Amino acid sequence: MPDQVTHPSVDVVVLGAGMISGPVAAELSRDGYKVVGIEKGPRWDYTSDWHPTNIHDEWAIAVERKFDHPLQIATFSIRNNREQFALPVRRYTKLVQYHALGHGVGGAATHWGASVGRYGPWSFKPYSETINKYGESMLPSNHDMEDFPITYDEAKPYYEAWEKAMGITGDNEDPFIPDVKYPLPPHPPTPVAERFRAAAESMGYHPNPAVSAITSGSYVNQYGVQRNACIQCGWCGGLCNYPCEVGAKTSSHVTTIPAALATGNFDLRLFSYVYRIDTNEQKTMATGVRYYDSAGNIHIQPAKVIFNGIWGYNIIRLMLLSGIGKPYNPVNSTGSLGRGLTDGYSPGVTNVRGTLEDIGGNAYSAGNASGGGFKILDFADDNFDHNGLNFIGGSAITLGGYLGSAPNLITANNPAKENFGSTWKGRLKDNKLPTRLTISSSPSGPEIPTKDQFVDLDPHYTDIYGDPIARITMDWGANRWRPADYIAPKVGEIFTKMGATNVIVTKVPELNQHVDWWGHHMRGGSRMGEKPETSVFNKWMQQWDLENHFAASETSFPFGDNITAGTHPAGMLAYLAADGIKKYLNSPGPLVA
């Protein structure tokens, strides 16, 4: 039998130590509260763990997945509808697959691409804006759309707190994202980006530098944590697999966790796997959490407040395993926990491609993962008239990022007589230094939540400790394809204005592809809202029926817009939750009647 250890009670126990839990740990510990953080992986130190002498191992990173969550501990299963048998994800299926989960302090953000950006005003009220302007008929009959319970204006101070903590880079003049005050300037643009900017501006559009979570200069955040500037080495890209050896790529391991530890009020427990939230008999109050240590011993950590900041599906799973919340029933559309799920990634849609014959690039390690480009939001959200159209939202158009996205030195070739010798080697060299560039865009639309997509517990598969894994029932809807049919030709006009040749729009039929892969940017399932019947958390990220349980994640979104990956607005929700927890600790009880 494993040993059982009960620890002294604390004010707050924070689950996870990534981009969402880090800000909560920093805010509360700096305010004098006693906080325990529980993290299933290690704590990475970029000055030693990612020193150049031991980080430049592409095989270990890209193939062995040394920085990713070990799927043998826990995974999830996926299917497209309730009639299918869900199959578990047992391995990372691509040589360099960025759809991986993090492991350790900082989570996936230790090695992400760091492309970020705010949700704008429309993203917070897409349902009401749509039906008020275009009518309910713009939405599918089985939609499960809801607005955020907060407005963009209410979100702004929490956005600013997260941006200051993380050292976000960007420009402050985007007309579609009001009142932005990014603390660092954007990264230098590439020649292709400059050409895109000039063409878009001449056509009346509004290009702005791509927003990045990689520091563009030396920086000290509001907690006094010093950050180094990006050295433009290019190693950090590589489809979100490569960490930063100078600490310029933002994650909690270089921003908020150091701030929390410096207070002396934060106790970080590593290699600890949370498996239950304990409650009182009435299921109205959480009493603490249970977790396994690396030796399999059981630990009980009592606390006044539980903050759940682990990866979104695992938030839902932990609540289901703990018997808290009202599970969603897809047969009669009752319950809230697990409902409203959407995929943050896109299928193949109508796309446009062209060739820039007179401009080249450097695809060797250079630049960084997310800087150098420009973005326009003129075709996103409701920034253009949708009357007469058969979709909502649109797509951001980004172009001109750095070509150097990690070394990508692993080259696979089928055996052939042509695949050796000086001529072949010369072609490989020239492949990294193109003298002309192909530009492309696949402007898919946002996913509309429906009553058919949800998360529950899988009745067939378990984690390493014997608990059921999460089961995902999800597929793409027509709103992914339809905006691309409208937008891709317009982007083609920009490409032509840029001087591109062979500009071709390739039509892709809608609903021709099903979700058959997965990623970390999933939305909905534990969403915030105004109604406890259809949402799990209120506007302060407090669970409706367990008043001292708070959480934040992309799965908290009632609607997952596609103008940014989702980490940025989820980070904003972390600061909103921290504010809610402070209010609760000052005066316990429901924060929303």
Image (cartoon, rainbow, N blue to C red):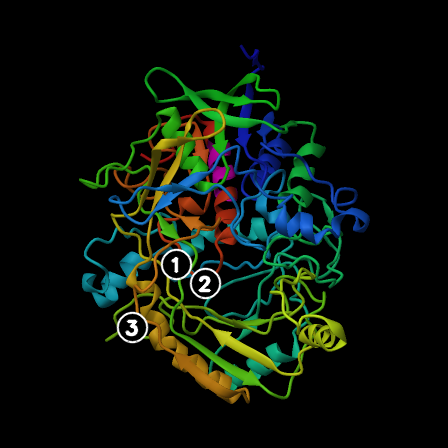
Marks 1 and 3 close (CB-CB < 8 Å): no
Q: Which residue is mark 1?
A: 123
State left or right for residue 21 relative to residue 368: left
The crowding category of the residue bearing disc 1, from other C-alpha atoms within 10 Å (few below 14, some 14 to 19, many at least 20), is many
Instruction: Choose top left, top right, bottom left or bottom right for residue 127.
Output: bottom left
Name the image quarter holding the C terminus. Answer: top left
Residues under labels 1 and 3: Cα distance? Answer: 15 Å
Marks 2 and 1 close (CB-CB < 8 Å): yes
Return the x and y of residue 68 as percentages of the image width and height: 59, 43
Residues under labels 2 and 3: Cα distance? Answer: 17 Å
What residue span does the magenta drawing correspond to?
Answer: 575-583
Q: Which residue is mark 3?
A: 386
Q: Earlier in the sequence, mark 2 or mark 3?
A: 3
**SS class of the residue under badge 1?**
helix
Instruction: Choose top left, top right, bottom left or bottom right for residue 430.
Output: bottom right
Nearest to the observer: residue 316 or residue 98: 98
Above or below: residue 62 compared with residue 314: below
Q: Which residue is mark 2?
A: 563
The crowding category of the residue bearing disc 2, from other C-alpha atoms within 10 Å (few below 14, some 14 to 19, many at least 20), is many
**SS class of the residue under badge 3?**
loop
Nearest to the observer: residue 85 or residue 135: 85
The crowding category of the residue bearing disc 3, from other C-alpha atoms within 10 Å (few below 14, some 14 to 19, many at least 20), is some
